Amino acid sequence: MPTIDILAPDLSVPARRAVAVRLTRYLTARGVPAGHVVVHFTAAEPGSLFTGGMPVEALPAAGPGLHHARVTVCVGPDRDHTFRSELAQEIAAALGMTEHTPFLYIEFRPTDPALVHLADGGRLKLATTARRNHA
């Protein structure tokens, strides 16, 4: 049940959709059912994200592409370092990171599916037992 929370400057709906579709396709190619992939976007308000005591907007960017983002990824505790590392690279690419990106933070949080509740046919069920048939 990979869940990816992205805090970044406001992206258009088509841009958010492109990121979500790319990450979903990436994960489904690795055996994750599409309906189990959750991507959530939050627009970073100016002055709400700091590094080294400075707002990230003040960090110099030498060119186009992603300026900054903070990403939290919840994946099952059975996912190994290689899976997490490759997913981090895919997230960076999907967001448009370049050599000019001054700040990108990606954190993984192992999350036991037995601790996640989902709606399933009008009832809450654990992620380990819920049907997720939608794409």
Image (tube, helix red, strand yellow):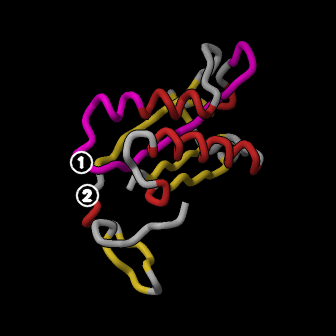
Query: Residue at position x 29%, y 54% from top?
Result: 111
Give the residue drawn at x 39%, y 49%.
32
C-alpha span from label 1 to label 2: 6 Å
Residue 130 or 124: which is nearer the viewer? 130
The residue at which mark 2 appears reads as 112
Tell me which amino acid carries mark 1.
Pro
Please give the residue where the numbered disc 1 appears in the rendered image. Answer: 77
Which quadrant is the N terminus positioned in?
bottom left
> Where residue 38 sits: x, y (%)?
50, 56
Q: Residue at x 69, y 18 (%)?
A: 61
Instruction: Relative to 33, say whether 104 is above or below.
Output: above
Camera-nearest residue between 67 and 50: 67
Q: Secondary structure at mark 2?
A: loop
Magenta segment: does it hold 85?
yes
| Span colored in magenta | 61-86
Describe the element under mark 1 as helix, strand or loop: loop
